[in-house]
Image (cartoon, rainbow, N blue to C red):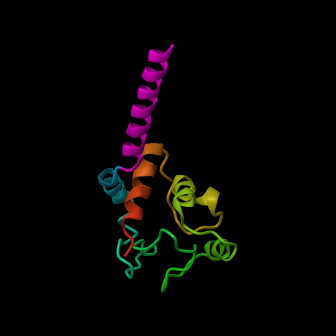
Amino acid sequence: MRPFIIKAAAVAASLLAASIAHAQDVEAGKAAFRKCAACHATDTTTNKVGQHLGDVVGRTAGTAEGFNFSPAMKKAGEEGLVWDEANLKKYLAAPRAKVPGTKMAFAGIKKPDELANLVAYLETLQE
């Protein structure tokens, strides 16, 4: 019985390690960001069609200085929406489902791995 438990624990640990490593693939997230780059800059000041994303993690929704957000996004921020990992994943998977009325005309990222990698990349953009 004991060898089985040890083998099971080893398999579980390797699966968990692989999952964590894959979920934090920043380079793959940087590649995924190419879908976003036409509308968003990665610095903390340049607003394009979309707001800058240089310090998006931890920011209250609808508050990037100098950007004209939709009333829906401003309201979401006023109601407490903050861009943490979980909220970014939900929003980037289905923007109009997370914030109905958003101006972001993007269908969303459907692949969980790509989504996790993109969020990992956005987390590196903090200054």
Q: Nearer the viewer, residue 124 or 4?
A: 4
* Residue drawn at point x = 36 percent, y = 64 percent: 124
Magenta stretch, overall SS: helix
Q: Is residue 46 visible?
A: yes
Q: Nearer the viewer, residue 120 or 51?
A: 120
Q: Position of residue 44 (x, y in %)?
A: 39, 79
> Where residue 111 appears, x then y in whole percent?
46, 43
What residue is rendered at 41% in x and 27% in y? Answer: 10
**Magenta residues?**
1-24
In the picture, the quarter occupied by the C terminus is: bottom left
Residue at the (56%, 77%) spot, across then down: 69
Quadrant in the rendering for residue 18: top left
Residue with the most extreme bottom position: 66
Whether 49 is drawn above or below 97: the answer is below
- Give above or below for 41 relative to 2: below
Q: Is 96 positioned to the left or the right of 119 in the image?
A: right
Instruction: Specify the farthest residue to the top.
Output: 1
